[in-house]
Amino acid sequence: MPHLTVEYSANLTALAPRALLLRLHQALVDTGHAKELDIKGRAIAFDDFQIGTEPGNRAFVHVKLLLLSGRTPEVKREIVDRLLQVLQQETDWPEGMLVQCAVELRDIDRAAFASGRIGA
């Protein structure tokens, strides 16, 4: 815990998902609200997507962050703002394309979650 998922439209061909994940992980660690080893990230590109109803040069990136419950609304806002800032500072967005960026933080009920480690 935390679990971070980046969903994005596959037309963002210059996006380097592993590098973006690393920047998002580092930003989360920098907030002081997550330990480096505990963050699990993954990125998923969607070939089939639709943005709005009109044709256009459009794309999306949506960051979902799952955290154990217990953080204040102020801490949650700090985290989502920092992750959105990482997206907005990304330099691999194509020229002339509208890229919609979003960050969503969800709580996981502590009583309904278990995890463990195997090996070194």
Image (cartoon, helix red, strand yellow):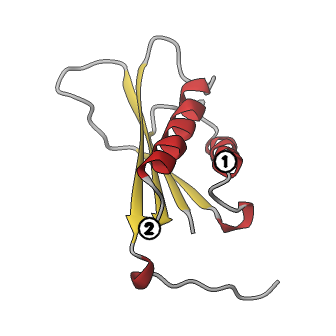
Q: Which mark is residue 69?
A: 2
- Residue 92 horizontal/vertical position (percent): 61, 25
Name the residue located 53 percent from the left edge and 19 percent from the top edge: 94
Q: Nearer the viewer, residue 73 or 30?
A: 73
Residue ranking furthest to the top: 96
Judge depth for marks 2 and 1 and give the one in front: 2
Q: CA distance from mark 2 to mark 1?
A: 27 Å
- Residue 111 position, x and y percent, is 41, 84
Q: Residue at x 63, y 23 (%)?
A: 91
Tell whether 45 sits left or right of 20: left
Q: Which disc number belongs to residue 18? A: 1
Q: Earlier in the sequence, mark 2 or mark 1?
A: 1
Residue 117 or residue 19, whichever sits in front: 117
Name the amino acid, label 2.
Ser
Q: Is residue 1 above or below residue 76?
A: below
Q: Position of residue 9 (x, y in %)?
A: 42, 38
Mark 2 surroundings: few (<14), some (14-19) or many (≥20) residues within 10 A = few
